[in-house]
Image (spheres, grey):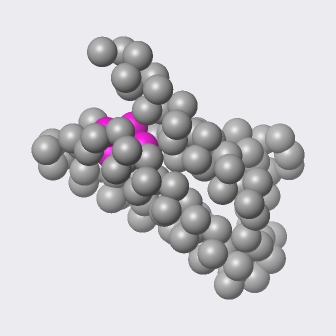
Amino acid sequence: MNRFFLLLALAWAALIFAASSQPGSSVGLPPPWDKLAHLITYAVLAGLLRAGGLAPAPALATAALYGLSDEWHQSFVPGRDASLADWAADVSGAVLALWLFHRKK
């Protein structure tokens, strides 16, 4: 386990939570840019988890579950909502990062 990358993953997750806590009027990228932002954000999270030493399946599961919890969290934030399409972009980003990580080796 590489604790440095796991701490970075934790910090990145905290940043995601902080951004998701902003009311909808203060954020809001138009489609398809919003999906690209989700993809990149969760690719970074999964990559950090993998670099931290998590095997691919746990890294993917962690990123996917965090994305799902983030969508649920947004359902309580004024002007935001939960979106399966956003979660699909989250999971796609995690899969892409893990594929790239594996391919690099």
Residue at the spot x=63%, y=75% of the render? 72
Whether residue 49 appears in magenta in the rendering, the answer is yes
Q: Quadrant of residue 81?
A: bottom right
Residue 12 picture location, percent across and down: 41, 54
| Residue 93 in view | yes
Residue 61's spot in the image, x, y percent?
43, 54
At which x and y percent is residue 19?
A: 58, 64
Magenta span: chief secondary structure:
helix
- Farthest right residue in view: 31
Left or right: where 23 falls relative to 5: right
Q: Which percent across, then down, holds residue 82?
A: 73, 70
Image vertical order of residue 69 relative to residue 86, above or below: below
Q: Is residue 40 in the magenta section?
A: no
Question: From which residue to which does the magenta span run?
Answer: 46-50
Extreme-front residue of the structure? 57
> Front-most of 28 and 95?
95
Q: Name the residue at 57% across, 39% down.
A: 93
Measuring 30% from the left and 15% from the top, which residue is drawn there? 105
Q: Give the farthest residue toward the top.
A: 104
**Res 41 seen here:** no
